[in-house]
Amino acid sequence: MDPVTAHAWTALGGRPDLTVEYTTAGEVLNAHLPVRDMARATVGVCALAAAELSARRNNTPIPPVTVDEAAVATAFISERHLRIDGRTGATFAPLSGFWRTADGWVRTHANYPHHRARLLKALNITEDRTALERELATRQAVEVQETVYAAGGLAVAVATEPDQTRRPLVVTRPTNAERRVLPPASRPAEGVRVLDLTRVIAGPVATRTLAFLGADVLRVDSPHLPEDPDAHADTGMGKRSTLLDLTTGHDRRTFDDLLDQADVVVTGYRPGALDRHDLAPEALHEKRPDLVVAQLRAWGYTGDWSHRRGFDSLVQAATGIAAVESTDGTPGVLPAQALDHGTGYLLAAAVLRALTERQGRHLRLSLAGTASWLLHDIEPSPARGDYDPEPWLVETASPYGTLRHARPPLTEDGTWERPPTLWGTDEPRWL
């Protein structure tokens, strides 16, 4: 096993005698940082964890595992490959991006309407790029960061060098409660019930991966926090989606019934958002110590920023990735939302390993932890061959229209059994 994959597999607690092979595909995900190696390792350990779980369930040897770099590269920019009846999916909003300040740069994130409104209110300007540019040019980067954060918005000062803070890739805490033994099945996660309490990319990538592997994934959202339909068309593959207001008695009882029968809960909201609903990992394990609870944060679990909200683009900016990828003094970006996608596959792998170990688990992952790994622990390997994404793109009919989308990168063929349903339109029940 190559050193990068071995590092991730060890972090997941995997057996050292297992290995993954890769089919190389040229200069994919090209960047100053070794994104290609990071990306293929996250998918590689996920594929290996799936093979391990399947072998455990069926009492069979673990088969050889091979991952194609072309498939990985295609999946890591799935949102860019997405076409809906020929239309390109939504990308970054006009007020999301890098902006000059009086002393450097800031990165803003304003894709969701409530984040855009808070950004504008914090800076006391109208919704206009020119007005935003002029205002930010008069301010200090850290002042903008703190002012916008205090207003519930999203902006970070762009770091000028890599953050030296070392964060763990995966933290696993067993509860020592035994889980039910999963019966033999044709797919690794068949019959596993997953409550998906995540948004945007990283968490939904993890849960759509579990859905591809056979899990019954039910995403639960608040009716007061709408989702972008294009984002859901991409990350909702294989899953169902329902709306529950946990502040009402009826919906809370419905949610608790779902929780009583769940095997896995994946959370990805800003820190503390679920705690007020008594859904912190500790509270979940007090009720169900056999649950696998997978928790995702932007900035990790220690330090001054551990309780802040964040997104991939902001973590790239604040950890120094944007500085490393800089061109002519302008902050740069990775060739994909690689922290999101990579953390998503690692999270799915961690869940699969917990199911193999047959114990309740509290799993902690973060975008900042993946960023730390990318910045400090990965040596690039030589790239060979050519890259063609076409074999890894398929068309699927869906309620959103005909979707042209990336296939899962875990196998050589196939796609999800069902397309994404319309956001929030499924019954709150298990199949």
Image (cartoon, rainbow, N blue to C red):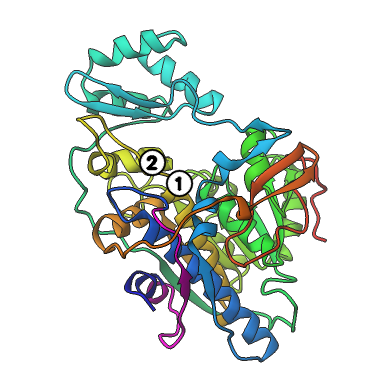
Q: Amino acid at mark 2?
A: Arg
> Does any portion of residue 96 appear in the rendered image?
yes
Q: Find the distance from the CA under tag 1 to the CA under tag 2.
A: 7 Å
Is residue 224 something that shows in the picture?
A: no
Say above or below: 148 vs 47. above
Please name the amino acid that badge 1 sits on.
Pro
Give residue 292's mark: none
* Quarter the N terminus occupies: bottom left
Q: Nearer the viewer, residue 348 or 63?
A: 63
Please say if 385 is above or below 85.
below
Residue 153 x/y as whole percent: 42, 27
Reading the chain from its start, which is encountered first: label 1 or label 2? 1
Nearer to us in this view, 325 or 99:
325
The C terminus, quarter of image: bottom right
Residue span colored magenta: 9-27
Q: Quadrant of residue 199?
A: top right
Q: Which residue is mark 2?
A: 308
- Describe the element under mark 1 as helix, strand or loop: loop
Residue 44 position in % (x across, y down): 48, 69
Q: Residue at x 70, y 87 (%)?
A: 58
Instruction: Looking at the picture, tell me which residue is in the foreground, 69 or 379.
Output: 69
Residue position for label 1: 271
Is residue 135 a member of the stretch shown in magenta?
A: no
Does the magenta portion include 24?
Answer: yes
Residue 193, quarter of picture: bottom right
